[in-house]
Amino acid sequence: MMRFFTAFGINKFNNLQLKDKTWQTISPYRQDITELKPSLSEKELWVGAFIGNYDKGGHKVSLEITIHKSDQNIHKNNTVIPLFNSLNIMEMAGQDYSTMFSQDKGLFVEFTLKKELKNAQLRYITTGHGGWENGDEFVPKANSIFLDGKMAFSFVPWRSDCGSYRLYNPASGNFGDGLSSSDLSRSNWCPGTVTNPNFIPLGDLKAGKHTIQIKIPQGPTEGTSFSSWNVSGVLLGNE
């Protein structure tokens, strides 16, 4: 539904004094999810939240879904088909991180359409993680999406605006050069922000079997640190 990243120490560590900064006290995350309406309307749903357990105190999360009766809707799709999600949501049960991109095959998914899908789009969310200074979290890497063996789209997911959210990150590591860890540009995410999906046009898809493949030139392990990529894909369109 949405991907967001908790800030570094907000509220709990607001007592830290740094350059007369006044820290924020909450991290709100808001996103338009109108394109998912066909899978949400008139249904009973379970909504889960995954947050890596790096603090024994855990996190408190609240969710509100607001419905606006408006004609300002750019998404006309009537179909939503989840295809893949490489986030290790069962991390605490031992599920491995998504390091399959170190192999040439990358992530490969087969799916079958019962009907033709017109104006198909891939709702694609991607974030790179891990590694030390040469890890994929801090090194731009191209994401290439292949549909039925042919490249449909390729781009470099990158966020260079992380410093804009410094006041949400009081416990961010502070460096001698004046930067803090939360300031650093990253592979499509910043601490305390939402990562937006990319909408990739795929054209009209015929009924039958299809394949989606994601390739990323994942970097090698550095010491005890490794790189991984969390990618998710949802197919949108009109039947």
Image: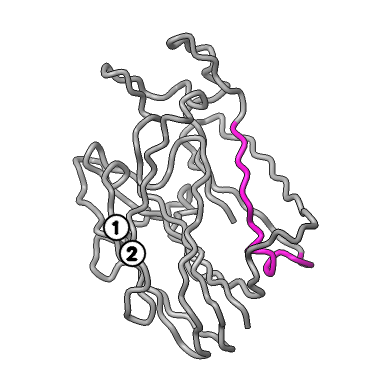
The residue shown at (58%, 23%) is 24
* Residue 162, magenta (yes or no): no
Residue 219 lies, in percent from the top left, at: 22, 52
**Front-most of 154 and 84?**
154
Q: Amino acid at mark 1?
A: Ala
Q: Quadrant of the C terminus?
A: bottom right
Query: Mark 1 or mark 2, which is nearer the start of the sequence?
Result: 1
Check disc 2: other Cα within 10 Å, few if <14, some if 14-19, many if 20+.
Answer: some
Q: Quadrant of the N terminus?
A: bottom right
Q: Any mark on residue 154, and which?
A: 2
Specify start and end residues of the magenta stretch as a single range. Answer: 27-43
**Front-most of 187 and 96?**
187
The residue shown at (56%, 88%) is 116
Q: Amino acid at mark 2?
A: Ser
Q: Any mark on residue 142, and which?
A: 1
Q: Please say if 50 is above or below 38.
A: above
Q: Please say if 31 is above or below 192.
A: below
